[in-house]
Amino acid sequence: MIAGNMAASLSTAILNQDDPETVRAGAPAFLIMIDGMIADNPKDADILLAGSKLYGAYATIFVKDEQRAQRMAIKAFKYAQRAICEQNISICESYTQSFEIFSNSLQKVQVNDVGSLYAFGSAWAGIVQVSSSDWKAIADLPKITLLMERVVELQETYDDGGAHTYLGVLSSLRPPSLGGKPEAGRQHFEKAIALSKGKNLMNKVLFARHYARLVYNRELHDQLLKAVTTADAEVADLTLINTLAQQQAKELLSTAEEYF
């Protein structure tokens, strides 16, 4: 219980930081600490999920070296995989099997497993994010999409609609001519913004980057990003991500003229 509370406190402290550079410099010590907690509590799903969340966030946000980012994302995935194996053996055994078998397993998941399922899907998507040239990782996108759709079916409000955010990005990775579904992506982004009451500024940044740029909608692009730059970033458990969102919004606006 003490280890679990400490892991949760570490996550909260990081999420409420308004200086990303402090997190970049200090988080590795927390990662090593949570590795130790997991070593002492190898079957504690809550600590495993906390470790997965921290490793996944650090890999996708702060690590620029692709090989290092992949190693950390894989560790995040392994922690999430161990957690879901403690809580739902069906998903644990089926995610590497055929799409049909995995789909059938997802239909058996109940609402009380949403947290571990969502964390597992997030970590899985993290591997794809840092492995853009790995076709084997990209081949898992249909399963990740199916998983997030199941989260939406069970509890779309979880993590303030975070599953909709993932589905928005996944639907907007390619133009319609190559199988993408950007208009479905737009609906997911708008739903995520509504469910988070607009407090998670990264939703608007991802909406602009993945949808507005894909369909060359300059007006929507600039509207979303300008709203991010003028918003209050300090929100409980979202301060770090909102600060990063404002940085990214300014970068996207600065390149808009040459992109459009």
Image: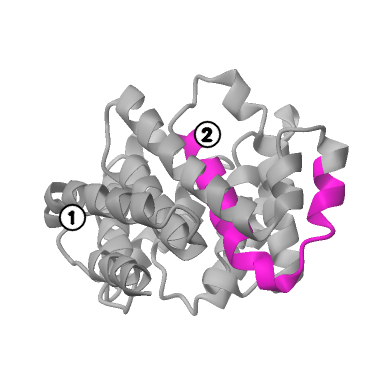
Q: Do the residues labelled 2 and 1 touch (CB within 8 Å)?
A: no
| Crowd class of label 1 (few under 14; some 14 to 19; many from 20; radius 10 Å) | some
Q: Is the magenta stretch mostly helix, strand or loop?
A: helix
Q: Give the range drawn in magenta.
A: 102-129
Q: In front here: 9 or 38?
A: 38
User: Residue 23: which disc?
Assistant: 1
Residue sitting at 40 percent across and 35 percent down? 259
Quarter of the figure with residue 230: bottom left
Q: Is residue 184 in view?
A: no
Disc 1 element:
helix
Q: Can you tell which quarter of the image residue 53 is in? A: bottom left
Residue 107 in percent (x, y) is at 84, 58
Please, is residue 246 above or below residue 125 in the view?
below
Amino acid type, callout 1:
Val
Q: Residue at x 61, y 28 (%)?
A: 138
Q: Does the magenta stretch include residue 141?
A: no
Disc 2 residue type (three-letter) = Val
